[in-house]
Amino acid sequence: MALAAELRFDVSAEIRKGAGVLDVEVRLHNRGDSPVRALFLEGELAGRRADAELAALKAGEARVLALRFPGYLPRPGRYALTFRIEYRPDQPAEALPRDEWAFVLVELGAQPQPALAVRIEPLTLDVAGTANVVLESADGAAHRAGVRVLLPSGVNVLEAPLEADVPAAGEVRVPVRLVRGDAPRGRPHAMIVIAGPVDGPLERASVAKGEIQIASDPAWLPRLRPGLAALGALLLLAAIALELRARRRPRP
């Protein structure tokens, strides 16, 4: 499951249990309108990581990549299998890498009911700001919850609690301090939060999807740049025309 903000990939996964390993077939679909290259896929499941690479993925193309996670899971239940997708745009040749996150929820050995309800309050980010993650018990019991925040490149976490106490009734807000890096202004950027109880016999992950709106550039100069560039080009052409006319004018 991928987000709508600035994302170009659809991801699905199928898990097969082996002898001491988990084999995952990941179907990666480029739903963008241009190809990508140098694609690197890193999957994470219960602290275990596996990766795969593709030299290129055409626009509209879907490919299946194989990931193998070693070892057994610490407890059965519902897990968030996350994917970091790093790639380079096909053009220009010197384009810098970009990345985005996607996830699927998988049930392994048990199908527990959700323990937590999770949501992200809206945030418009200029330079730095706080995104509030709201946690609430979904089963009427108090929980000590682990919290994980996933952001694309260009937006960074300054400070975020790794765990939070959730009462049996009522909401608790978990502040996540963010800072803008090189994320483009005037666009939404995806944010994913994974939360679940750290105790108990079952894994019970819940996921919230949201968007961080990056504020438009408040300065006047960037808005005037296109017009100033056009005016400069016209003045340059006018100066060249005057120079040519002066050269053609016959001398007395």
Image (spheres, rainbow, N blue to C red):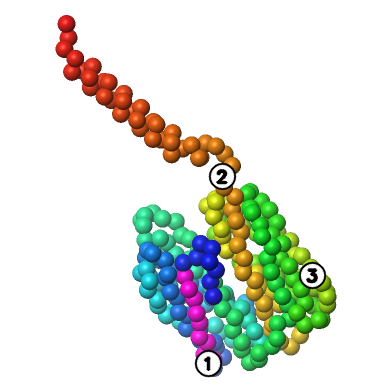
Determine whether the residue tagged by mark 1 lies in a helix, strand or loop.
loop
Determine whether, in the image, residue 188 is placed left or right of residue 162. Answer: left
**Who's the residue at 79% across and 70% down the image?**
171
Asked if 60 appears above or below 152 in the picture, the reply is below
The residue wearing badge 2 is 217
Determine whether the residue tagged by mark 2 lies in a helix, strand or loop.
loop
Determine whether, in the image, residue 252 is placed left or right of residue 28. Answer: left
**Who's the residue at 16% across and 12% down the image?**
250
Percent x, y of residue 192: 62, 68
Determine whether the residue tagged by mark 3 lies in a helix, strand or loop.
strand
Answer few, some or many: residues within 10 Å of disc 3's Cα (few below 14, many 20 plus, some between 14 and 19): some
Q: Which residues are magenta?
A: 9-18
**Who's the residue at 70% across and 56% down the image?**
130
Percent x, y of residue 143: 79, 78
Give, as a three-letter code, the residue at label 2.
Answer: Asp
Asked if 51 appears above or below 182 in the picture, the reply is below
The residue wearing badge 3 is 171
Image quadrant for the C terminus? top left
Residue 1 in view here? yes
In the foreground, 74 or 231: 231
Number of callouts: 3
**Who's the residue at 56% across and 78% down the image?**
104
Q: Quadrant of residue 74?
A: bottom right
Inspect the magenta stretch and tell me whether residue 68 lies in it: no
Tag 2 and tag 3, C-beta contact below 8 Å: no
Precedes in sequence: disc 3 or disc 1: 1
Mark nearer the viewer, 3 or 1? 3
The residue wearing badge 1 is 18
Mark nearer the viewer, 1 or 2? 2
Mark-to-mark CA distance, 2 and 3 = 34 Å
Mark-to-mark CA distance, 3 and 1 = 41 Å
Precedes in sequence: disc 1 or disc 2: 1
